[in-house]
Each structure stands twice: as structure tokens, then as C-alpha cells.
Image (cartoon, grey):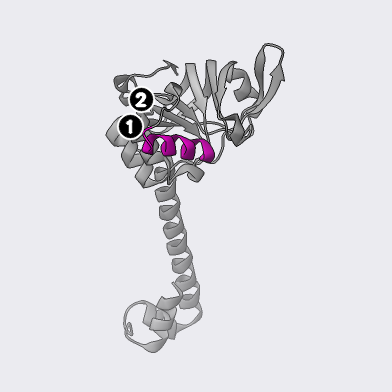
């Protein structure tokens, strides 16, 4: 279990390995679709962007906030599905030097490539743990772009052991999501092969003629081709 203190250095990020469990302490900003678009538009126009984005830990989250006498308090802060930001995130990473992204569900190969180039990791947060994650976010230190709405604004927090989070995509491009996908494909193929062998076995026991086809004495026959097509 690793305790990360932001802002993160590139060396610290590249030292993290796939499957590591981490907690984050220090500055974290939340941002979803609209915040990404606003930030990139301002950068394209050569206008000033919030300094909080530079080298940040970016949490894909639309927090529920409550206004207090002395500022804002976070009520709930569950992760947003990160795929929503797939089109925008590669440029965000390159433009702002983002060191870590927190979210759920993983991101596209294009985002992973930008992460490899720049030194960034993807930290998976647990869905359904919005209140617990809100406690980890700790104190709200500011908000930008309130005109976008509560969920889409850029919120800044001083976190205290936000987590646990899992390194689901590391800075070398290794991905738990890709590993799971490959494993499911292998399992599906294996299951299909076992099923086909079972079908062939049952048919061969019932018919000597089919047994002959299956043993290869009539591999080019039409019934054998039909049986093979089933498998």
C-alpha cells in the first residue's frame, strides 16, 4: 500500500506498478466533460487557465456540494465513468502535464498512449462509495467555472488519504482492463471448444457413421462440414 503526496513527480508516477493500492494526500481537482472543454478552449485561445490543473491529480467526478458559512463542504463524490472523457483526455494530459487520473471503467488506447508519453497513471476508484470518497477528499479549497453547474465545475480539494485506489493503468501502458478483456476472450474460446468436443463426443457415440466422419475417414463429406460449422 502506497501513500502518494501530490503534486506528484514523474519519477513517483513511473514507479507505480499495475495493481498497486494507493492513497492520495494533497491537492486534487475534479473535472468532467465541460471542465475539460473549457480548459482546452482557453488554452487554444491563449488565455489563462487555472493553475490548479498544471501537473494535477484529476478526479473524474461531479461532486455534490453544500454551501457552508465558511465555504463549501463535499457531501458525496463518486467517480464518473471515465470513457466520457476519452476524446478530450489525451490533449488534457499533454497540455497540462496531468500526473494521475482518478475514475472508473478505464480509458481508451489513445489516452493510454498519452499517459505513457507524459508519465501519468489511472487510479480506479470504487463505484458506490461516494460518501466514503467524499470523506477522503477532505477540505474544499476553491471552485472555478461555477457557471457550468455544480457537477461540471472545477473543484479543488486538499485531500487526506483519498482511497483506497488501484493502479489500473500504469505509466508503461499496462492495463488491468485490457488484461481482463483478454482473459474473457480466452475463457470464451475455451468454453466453446469444450462444448464442441462434447457435442462431437455425444454424436459419435450415437452413430457409427458420425464416428467415422469425426475420426477423419470422411473429413471432406458434407455432414462433417455441417458438424464443423456448428463448432
In which quarter of the view is residue 48 placed?
Answer: top left
**Residue 43 covered by magenta stretch:** yes
Is residue 120 left or right of 69 when viewed as pictured?
Answer: left
Q: Nearer the viewer, residue 218 or 79?
A: 79
Is residue 110 left or right of 166 when viewed as pictured?
Answer: left
Q: Is residue 206 above or below residue 187?
A: below
Q: Are marks 1 and 2 in contact (CB under 8 Å)?
A: yes
Q: Earlier in the sequence, mark 1 or mark 2?
A: 2
Q: Mark 1: which secondary structure?
A: loop
Which residue is rendered at x = 63% and y = 34% of the image? 149
Residue 39 picture location, percent across and down: 45, 34
Specify the farthest residue to the top.
70
Instruction: Point out which mark residue 184 bears.
Output: none
Q: Residues within 10 Å of mark 2 (few under 14, many from 20)?
A: some
Residue 7 picture location, percent across and down: 40, 17
Q: Which residues are magenta?
A: 33-46
Measure how far apart labels 1 and 2 are at the Cα level. 8 Å
Residue receiving disc 2: 16
Residue receiving disc 1: 171
Q: Is residue 144 above or below residue 180?
A: above
Residue 104 visible in image: no
In which quarter of the view is residue 14 placed?
Answer: top left
Which residue is rendered at x = 44% and y = 31% of the image? 101
Front label number (1 vs 2): 1
Q: Is residue 146 above or below residue 180?
A: above
Residue 38 picture location, percent across and down: 48, 37
Residue 19 picture location, percent across and down: 42, 30
Residue 140 visible in image: yes
Identify the main secondary structure in magenta: helix
Q: Mark 2: which secondary structure?
A: loop
Amino acid at each position: 500500500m502506497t501513500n502518494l503526496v501530490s503534486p506528484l513527480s514523474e519519477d513517483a508516477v513511473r514507479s507505480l506498478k499495475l495493481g498497486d493500492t494507493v492513497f492520495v494526500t494533497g491537492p486534487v481537482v475534479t473535472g468532467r466533460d465541460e471542465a475539460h472543454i473549457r480548459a482546452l478552449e482557453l488554452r487554444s485561445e491563449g488565455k489563462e487557465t487555472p493553475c490548479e490543473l498544471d501537473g494535477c491529480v484529476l478526479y473524474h467526478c461531479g461532486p455534490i456540494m453544500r454551501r457552508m458559512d465558511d465555504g463549501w463542504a463535499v457531501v458525496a463524490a463518486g467517480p464518473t465513468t471515465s470513457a466520457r472523457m476519452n476524446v478530450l483526455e489525451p490533449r488534457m494530459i499533454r497540455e497540462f502535464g496531468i500526473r494521475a487520473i482518478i475514475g472508473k471503467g478505464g480509458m481508451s488506447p489513445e489516452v493510454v498512449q498519452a499517459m505513457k508519453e507524459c508519465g501519468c497513471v489511472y487510479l480506479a476508484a470504487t463505484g458506490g462509495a461516494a460518501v466514503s470518497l467524499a470523506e477522503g477528499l477532505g477540505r474544499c479549497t476553491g471552485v472555478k467555472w461555477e457557471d457550468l453547474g455544480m457537477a461540471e465545475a472545477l473543484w479543488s480539494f486538499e485531500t487526506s488519504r483519498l482511497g483506497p485506489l488501484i493502479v489500473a493503468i500504469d505509466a508503461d501502458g499496462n492495463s488491468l482492463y485490457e488484461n481482463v478483456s483478454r482473459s474473457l476472450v480466452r475463457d470464451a474460446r475455451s468454453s466453446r471448444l469444450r462444448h464442441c468436443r462434447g457435442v462431437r463426443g455425444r454424436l459419435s457415440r450415437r452413430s457409427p457413421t458420425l464416428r467415422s466422419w469425426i475420426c477423419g475417414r470422411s473429413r471432406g463429406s458434407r455432414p462433417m462440414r455441417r458438424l464443423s460449422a456448428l463448432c
